[in-house]
């Protein structure tokens, strides 16, 4: 509990950020958030019904204890993303925003160029911007220079569950920027979350990895524990890798 992290002046204990899509019901969404131990939850603004005739994912979020991170999922231009963030502000949601500007409908890879344009505008308007980007160290450094509060490089395509495909690039990003690095997209199981934390990332964001599991509530617990274990392993410092065996017991003083 003493290993906290800070984002734009706000302190968090949990290093797991969860999404709210793809669950079977509002009740399952609510319970998964609780079991995950998350303190920050992201919501796709463009998928929220404005008339609110029926319960929405917002009813699953306890705003008294959870930080809300509205996101711009479904936006394909900087203009769309900026407009969506302004809507979140008008609705009194938050000035924290997860910026997504998608460049391709098949892969859902982000459009880094449009993301940079949108980030500049949003930072200038006082938003706390967390941009979703490819695992490109140069783009991440540019986003830091713009004034983003964190960078969120993908581990793999959204919803793919493929895990971290390029840990080398994540390591370079961690060396290149001083703001928090949050792995986003592609985490499929607990070991993927642990690897992200073992690399030294500040946090992990996931949705499908939990909601798409056979037992989402049990997976929420597994992801919570994996993030904690991976962070502890990072702090502990792993043993060096060796090409050959190294006996666990000392060989000196053995009786011949």
Image (tube, helix red, strand yellow):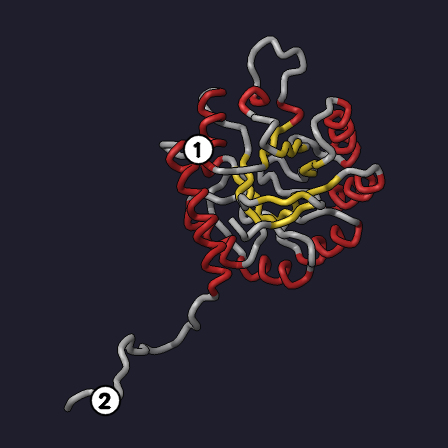
Report crowding for label 1: few under 14, some 14 to 19, many 20 or more residues within 10 A (C-alpha). some
Nearest the camera: 181 or 164? 181
Count of numbered badges drawn on the protein:
2
Residue visible at 44% across and 34% down in the picture: 35
Residue visible at 45% across and 42% down in the picture: 224
Considering only order in the chain, which callout, 1 or 2, is on the residue closer to the N terminus?
1
Residue visible at 75% across and 35% down in the picture: 77
* Label 2 sits on residue: 253
Residue 255's quadrant in the figure? bottom left
Q: Where is residue 66 in the image (x, y as percent from the top left)?
A: 59, 32
Residue visible at 50% across and 27% down in the picture: 22
Q: Where is residue 50 in the image (x, y as percent from the top left)?
A: 67, 15
Q: Residue furthest bottom?
A: 256
**Quadrant where the image shows the C terminus:** bottom left
Residue 103's quadrant in the figure? top right
* Label 1 sits on residue: 212
Q: Which residue lies furthest to the top in this view?
A: 53
The reply to whether callout 2 and callout 1 are in contact (CB within 8 Å) is: no
């Amino acid at each position: 509990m003493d290993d906290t992290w800070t984002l734009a002046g706000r302190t968090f204990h949990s290093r797991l950020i969860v999404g709210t899509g793809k669950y079977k019901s509002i009740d399952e969404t609510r319970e998964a958030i609780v079991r995950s131990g998350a303190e920050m939850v992201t919501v796709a603004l463009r998928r929220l019904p404005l008339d609110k005739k029926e319960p929405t994912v917002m009813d699953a979020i306890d705003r008294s204890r959870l930080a809300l991170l509205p996101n711009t999922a479904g936006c394909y231009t900087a203009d769309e993303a900026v407009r969506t963030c302004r809507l979140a502000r008008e609705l009194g949601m938050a000035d924290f925003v997860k910026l997504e500007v998608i460049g391709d409908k098949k892969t859902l890879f982000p459009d880094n160029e449009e993301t940079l344009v949108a980030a500049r505008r949003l930072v200038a308007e006082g938003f706390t911007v967390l941009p979703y980007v490819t695992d490109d160290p140069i783009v991440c450094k540019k986003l830091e220079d713009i004034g983003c509060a964190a960078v969120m490089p993908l581990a793999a395509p959204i919803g793919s569950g493929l895990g971290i495909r390029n840990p080398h690039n994540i390591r370079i990003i961690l060396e290149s920027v001083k703001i928090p690095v949050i792995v986003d997209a592609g985490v499929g199981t607990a070991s993927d979350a642990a690897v992200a934390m073992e690399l030294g990332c500040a946090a992990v964001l996931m949705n499908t990895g939990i909601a798409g599991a056979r037992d989402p509530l049990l997976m929420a617990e597994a992801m919570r524990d994996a993030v904690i274990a991976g962070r502890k392993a990072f702090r502990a410092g792993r043993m060096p890798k060796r090409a050959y065996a190294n006996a666990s017991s000392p060989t000196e003083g053995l009786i011949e």
